[in-house]
Image: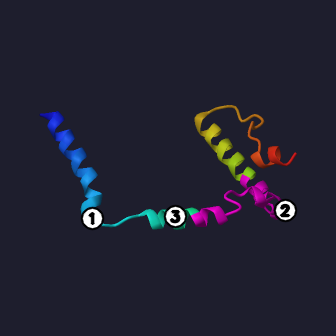
Amino acid sequence: MFNIIVKTAFTALLLQSTFAHPGHDGTAEMKERAAYMTKLRNRDLSHCATAMEESGLTRRIKERREEYIRALRMKRGLSNGKSTFSSRVSTINP
C-alpha cells in the first residue's frame, strides 16, 4: 500500500511541471543564462581582499568573532586562553 502511495506521489511531482507550463521550452532561457555567466569575471570576493584590509573590515570581523568565541567560552566555563582563531585573509595575503 505504501509503495503505491510513493509511486503516485512521485508521478504527480514529475507531471507537475508539464501541467504548470504546457509547451514551455526552457532551452532559450538556459542559453541566455549560460551566455550571461560566461561574461562574469569575478564570482567571489578575492579581488576585494586589499580593499577590505585597507578599510579595516577584516580587523573588525576578526575582533567580532574573537569576542563571540570569548563569550561562548565564558558561558561554558572554559579557559579563556589565547584564541586559536586566525583570519583566512591573512593566510591568503601573507
Amino acid, disc 3? Lys
| 13 horizontally vs 73: left or right | left
Residue 31 circle label: 3
Query: What amino acid is labelled 1 in the image?
Result: Ala
Labelled disc at residue 87 = none
- Circle 2 crowding by C-alpha within 10 Å: few under 14, some 14–19, many from 20: few
- Give the foreground label among 1 and 3: 3
C-alpha span from label 2 to label 3: 40 Å
Residue 54 picture location, percent across and down? 84, 62
Name the dominant secondary structure of the magenta segment.
Answer: helix
Would residue 26 appear left or right of 62 to someone viewing this image? left
Q: Mark 1–mark 3 contact, CB under 8 Å?
A: no
Quick check: 86 above or below 1?
below
In which quadrant of the rendered image does the N terminus lie? top left
Q: Name the residue under label 1.
A: 20
Is disc 3 surrounded by few (<14), some (14 to 19) or many (20+) residues within 10 Å? Answer: few
Tell me the distance, in whole angstroms, between the alpha carbons under discs 1 and 2: 51 Å
Q: Residue at x 66, y 42 (%)?
A: 69
First-in-chain label (2 vs 3): 3
Distance between the Cα atoms at labels 1 and 3?
22 Å
Q: Residue at x 64, y 62 (%)?
A: 38
Which residue is the site of mark 2? 54
**Kind of residue at disc 2:** Glu
Residue 13 lies in magenta, yes or no?
Answer: no
Q: Judge by depth and name the residue closer to the eye, 77 or 6.
A: 6
In the image, 24 versus 94, the foreground residue is: 24
* Secondary structure category for the residue under label 3: helix
User: Which corner quadrant holds the C terminus?
Assistant: top right
